[in-house]
Image (cartoon, helix red, strand yellow):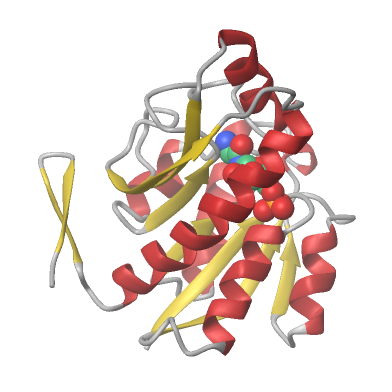
Amino acid sequence: MKNIIVLVSGGGTNLQALLDAQDRGEIKNGKITCVISSNPNAYALTRAANHGVETEVIRRRDFAAFDDYDAALTALLQQKNADLIVLAGFMTILGSRVIRAFENRIINIHPALIPSFCGEGYYGLRVHEEALKKGVKVTGATAHFVNEICDGGPIIIQKAVEVRSGDTPAILQKRVMEQAEWQILPKAVALFCEDKIKVTDGITEILD
Ligand code: GAR
């Protein structure tokens, strides 16, 4: 059974999708054992507590140097025996220490079809604002492994979502969450826990 640690910062709807998938028995060889938030007021912490999942808070601003924050987060994840780390709306950039310690064991959900609308500065509603500004007719979400390039790690699953005329960033965000993120993130986690994701030279292959 793989130990899954979920990192959050906000509302936690992707965390909820993971907890619901776990309750439905869809994450066969894994269990969410801890939720770590970068924000003590995140509603995601309430969702975790309601589910009886242990919570921790670690804030970037409590460390003078970024390297100390990176070391503390790495140590916390090691102490919790993380097999898989899921970034579910985690808004603090990870350092190279934690990324190297958990190579191809950190999954992020990004609310666009990478390589569009991604990289530094593209998070949350901003992503949808930029998609609407560009006038794309299709957007979506991507579940991917995390490497040292922001939003640049191996892609696991993508799902497209249509953009409709009259969309606002908030309306589009909601559609992308409902039709893509909440489906593909639990699916990617389930595949990982069943050892069904093979990574070769930065490209993933889903094994049957
Ligand atoms: C989600 O849309 C997630 O894809 C996005 O933040 C939102 C968090 O919502 N993540 C990023 O933009 C990361 N670059 P949630 O807290 O309700 O899951």
* Residue that sits furthest to the left in the current view: 200
The quadrant in which residue 129 appears is top right
Query: Residue at position x 64%, y 10% from top?
Result: 133
Residue 186 in percent (x, y) is at 47, 67
Residue 130 in the figure: left or right of residue 27: right
* Residue that sits furthest to the front in the current view: 165
Residue 27 in the figure: left or right of residue 134: left
165 vs 95: above or below? above
Count of number-bearing discs: 0
Residue 177 in percent (x, y) is at 62, 50
The quadrant in which residue 5 appears is bottom right
Image quarter where the N terminus lies is: bottom left
Query: Dividing the image into four equal quarters, which quarter contains ligand 1?
Result: top right
Residue 93 in percent (x, y) is at 57, 35
Q: Can residue 68 be seen in this view?
A: no
| The one of 89 and 62 positioned closer to us in this rendering | 89
Image quarter where the C terminus lies is: bottom left
* Residue that sits furthest to the top in the current view: 134
Q: Is residue 151 visible?
A: yes
29 vs 127: above or below? below
The quadrant in which residue 27 appears is bottom left
Query: Residue at position x 76%, y 26% from top?
Result: 168
